[in-house]
Amino acid sequence: MNPRLTTLISIIALCALYRVLPHPWNVSPVAAMALFAGAHFQTRAMAVLVPLAAMAVSDLLLGLHPTLPFVYGALVVTVALGFWVGKDISPARVLAGSLSGSLLFFFVTNAAVWLVGDFYPSGINGLWQALAAGVPFFQYTLLGDLVFNALFFGLFYALERHFPKQFAH
């Protein structure tokens, strides 16, 4: 494998490892991993499959739950946001992709808990309750996404600048 692909896969693998280690609640590299993969993998198939494989491995260790299809769906959409970011990577696009991914993940996962769980009543009031219950955790999701996106995109940019031949597309 070339250094670029090895580095990309290593970053994704480290995200999976981070998920199974103790860490602050909701401060996770998951959405950043998806955005980063969409922006940097040379094929769309790899951009989708590598993060999903990393998630699947870590989910087998963490435990499965009924909202996983929604989580994985949100990740695939975040990878697609990464395709847009990758067309012309800039701090503004990374920030927009990061914020969009955070909001998407918040709405999809909290709505999924309402839809497939029995924690909230059916109907629009139950959905609003599920969304409201997630608000206190959103700040941590947002923080994790912003920090990990800055770290992944910044580190990879530095590697591309320092090793241009090894990291060329």
Image: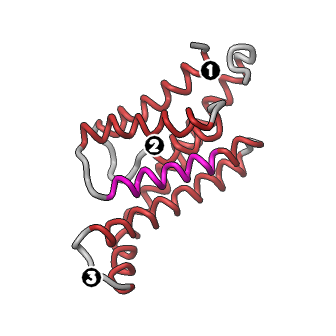
> At 36% across and 36% down in the image, what residue appears?
18
Q: CA distance from mark 1 to mark 3?
A: 48 Å
Can you identify the residue that label 1 sits on? 4
> At 28% across and 57% down in the image, what residue appears?
66
Q: Look at the numbered discs 1 and 2 and tell me whether their residues touch, using CB distance below 8 Å.
A: no
Q: Look at the numbered discs 1 and 3 and tell me whether their residues touch, using CB distance below 8 Å.
A: no
Marks 1 and 2: which is nearer the front? 1
| Residue type, label 1 | Arg
Q: Residue furthest front?
A: 45
Picture layout, residue 85 above or below residue 111: above
The N terminus lies in quadrant: top right
The first of marks 1 and 3 along the sequence is: 1
Q: CA distance from mark 3 to mark 2?
A: 31 Å
Marks 1 and 3: which is nearer the front? 3
Can you identify the residue that label 3 sits on? 121
| Residue type, label 3 | Pro
Highlighted range, magenta:
67-82
- Neighbor class of circle 2 (other Cα within 10 Å; few <14, some 14-19, many 20+) is many
The verdict on residue 93 being magenta is: no
Picture layout, residue 42 above or below residue 82: above
The first of marks 1 and 2 along the sequence is: 1
The first of marks 3 and 2 along the sequence is: 2
Can you identify the residue that label 2 sits on? 29
